[in-house]
Image (tube, grey):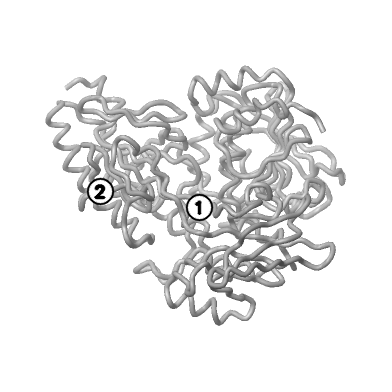
């Protein structure tokens, strides 16, 4: 056997870190097959934004994030490897499959596409224009922006029903706009919505258009039965919100040319989750199936894994190559993320970090090439004490982090932690607030990128970063509960760590309301370039670089 060729070989690469991908990774790793899970965003998938899961057998009640985080830990325990990167393409090379990612190419016998689906845009007039200015797609991320406002929820499925009830925590009124004459979610959920005193449901109604200036001022509805148009306007001087939950589009781009797709873009598989291309499998919501639930995604992943086990064993015999068996506990691939502390940045297990987080962080810090200084700039608010506790706990884990304190003051940029090199020069990375919740992982990745060696990226992206030849001040406004924010934050920090002309400053919107007012922010993540250009929504490193390359991106406000 050619040991050299087997050293970098995987039995399977799973693209997508949701329930289907995690279940497959767990089964494969437990069966002693080498498996890598590639995820571009947040491990856990769409279910992580679900506040309450009550229909998963054996688990009476849990949060989506908690459920999938347990799955991830199980897979990690059995030796699965994890990589935070964007899969860009799949090549068939004889007996091998090559998965090209933003962090390099990976060779394997089999590929499992568990890429899931993403929220579908409705296409009403003004939807794109007012994205982030009143049109939103995540109630958990953006609900707080609409406190004591009227809110309209577009959609009649499970997500729309659940998010409508969630939004009653903030909104003055919540109205669901349902195209059909009934809700399309489970009857038990429909009954809750219809009985909810703060939710109104308008059937046979679609949103035709929204209008406004810096925020929404007018909406036009159409009755699908009579065709009658109706206009809504909030009280004088107020605005309102529109949350879109009109189903999901399968993320099946990688399968084009490799698998049969339905008219809706879903991947067609057989009972073993095989596609028409040998060695290429699919599982979860990206597939053509009748029921899309966590339990069916997990089932798909398990079925695919057992099918891949047989295929990989056959390929090992055919090629004479056997990938390294996974270690237990696993040797990290360099990309596994530490579990995030709570969104409220409070202590767990007697401190800010859990024992498991400390163990994971120790591995990350051990790989850092150069020491860093965490320069803390506190103010007089209690949040500064949270920041102090967190930084001290981080510094206690490694001699590569030193904390420096400046005297407290109530400046508009405080509290803040700036990341400096050992010689005191600024890396350009800063977090204003406390990097907890979903931003904990991105902060740690930022430290890793600043200290080196950092995340490996596609050479073309590295060249694009190096080619930036004008100062760019990137302000990223986030919410710690937002699952869509970290990808943009990590991308911006990677650019700042690699190019001295770029700064990446992250702000917790809950502690810096003046930014929200100044830029009329009603959705996160919000990217502000040179205090002039504003953009909303999550972005990959490639998408961010494309945006920064636009001529107007260099203008200063």
The residue lying toward the viewer, choosing from 300 and 252, is 252
Pointer 2 or 1: first along the chain: 1
Q: Residue 456 got which mark?
A: none
The residue lying toward the viewer, choosing from 71 and 78, is 71
Indicate left or right for 423 with 113 as reference: right
Q: Which residue is mark 1?
A: 120
- What is the CA distance from the residue labelled 2 to the residue labelled 1? 23 Å
Q: Is label 2 in a helix, a strand or a loop? A: loop
> Residue shown at 31%/49% (left/top)?
283
The residue lying toward the viewer, choosing from 7 and 350, is 7
Instruction: For residue 351, say whether it is visible.
Output: no
Vertical side of 148 occupied by 505: above or below:
above
Q: Nearer the viewer, mark 2 or mark 1?
A: 1
Q: Residues within 10 Å of mark 2 (few under 14, many from 20)?
A: many
- Quadrant of residue 350 in the image? bottom right
The residue lying toward the viewer, choosing from 110 and 9, is 110
Quadrant where the C terminus is found in the figure: top right
Residue 88 locus on image (x, y percent): 42, 32
Are dots 2 and 1 in contact, CB under 8 Å? no
Residue 147 locus on image (x, y percent): 73, 65
Q: Is label 1 in a helix, a strand or a loop? A: loop
Residue 207 locus on image (x, y percent): 61, 62
Indicate left or right for 279 with 106 as reference: left
Residue 225 locus on image (x, y percent): 53, 72
The number of callouts visible is 2
> Residue shown at 20%/43% (left/top)?
309
Q: Which residue is mark 2?
A: 269
Q: Residues within 10 Å of mark 1 (few under 14, many from 20)?
A: some
Instruction: For residue 359, say whether it is visible.
Output: yes
- Quadrant of residue 477 in the image? top right
Quadrant where the N terminus is found in the figure: top left
């Amino acid at each position: 056997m050619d040991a050299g060729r087997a050293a970098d070989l995987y039995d399977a690469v799973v693209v997508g870190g949701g329930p289907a991908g995690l279940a497959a990774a767990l089964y494969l790793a437990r069966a002693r097959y080498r498996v890598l899970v590639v995820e571009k965003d947040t491990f856990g998938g769409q279910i992580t934004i679900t506040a309450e899961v009550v229909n998963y057998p054996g688990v009476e009640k849990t949060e989506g994030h908690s459920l999938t985080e347990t799955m991830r830990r199980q897979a990690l325990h059995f030796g699965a490897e994890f990589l935070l990167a964007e899969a860009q393409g799949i090549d068939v090379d004889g007996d091998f499959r090559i998965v090209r990612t933003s962090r390099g190419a990976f060779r394997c016998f089999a590929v499992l596409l568990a890429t899931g689906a993403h929220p579908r845009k409705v296409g009403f007039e003004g939807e794109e224009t007012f994205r982030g200015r009143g049109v939103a797609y995540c109630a958990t991320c953006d609900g707080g922006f609409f406190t004591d406002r009227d809110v309209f929820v577009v959609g009649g499925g499970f997500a729309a029903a659940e998010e409508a009830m969630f939004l009653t925590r903030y909104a003055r009124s919540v109205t669901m706009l349902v195209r059909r004459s009934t809700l399309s979610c489970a009857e038990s959920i429909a009954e809750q919505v219809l009985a909810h005193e703060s939710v109104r449901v308008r059937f046979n109604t679609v949103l035709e258009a929204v209008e406004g200036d810096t925020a929404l001022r007018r909406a036009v509805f159409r009755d699908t039965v009579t065709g009658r148009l109706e206009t809504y306007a909030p009280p004088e001087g107020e605005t309102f919100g529109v949350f879109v939950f009109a189903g999901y589009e399968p993320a099946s781009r990688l399968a084009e040319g490799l698998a049969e797709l339905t008219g809706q873009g879903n991947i067609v598989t057989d009972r073993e989750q095989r596609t028409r291309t040998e060695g290429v499998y699919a599982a979860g919501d990206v597939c053509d199936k009748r029921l899309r639930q966590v339990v069916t995604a997990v089932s798909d992943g398990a079925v695919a894994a057992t099918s891949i086990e047989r295929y990989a064993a056959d390929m090992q015999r055919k090629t004479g190559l056997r990938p390294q068996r996974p270690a237990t506990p696993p040797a990290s691939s360099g990309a596994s993320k530490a579990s995030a502390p709570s969104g409220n940045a409070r202590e767990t297990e007697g401190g800010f970090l859990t024992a498991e987080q400390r163990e994971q962080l120790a591995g990350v810090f051990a790989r850092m090439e150069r020491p860093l200084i965490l320069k803390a700039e506190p103010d007089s608010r209690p949040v500064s004490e949270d920041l102090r506790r967190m930084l001290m706990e981080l510094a206690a884990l490694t001699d590569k982090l030193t904390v420096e304190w400046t005297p407290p003051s109530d400046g508009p940029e405080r509290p803040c932690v700036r990341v400096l090199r050992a010689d005191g020069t600024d890396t350009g990375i800063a977090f204003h607030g406390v990097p907890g919740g979903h931003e904990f992982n991105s902060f740690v990745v930022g430290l890793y990128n600043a200290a080196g060696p950092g995340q490996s990226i596609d050479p073309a992206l590295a060249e694009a970063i190096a080619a930036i030849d004008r100062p760019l001040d990137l302000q990223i406004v986030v919410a710690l509960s937002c699952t869509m924010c970290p990808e943009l934050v990590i991308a911006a920090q990677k650019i700042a760590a690699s190019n001295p002309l770029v700064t990446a400053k992250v702000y917790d919107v809950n502690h810096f309301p003046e930014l929200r007012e100044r830029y009329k922010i009603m959705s996160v993540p919000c990217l502000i370039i040179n205090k002039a250009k504003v953009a909303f929504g999550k972005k990959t490193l490639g998408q961010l670089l494309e945006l920064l390359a636009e001529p107007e991106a260099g203008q200063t406000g």
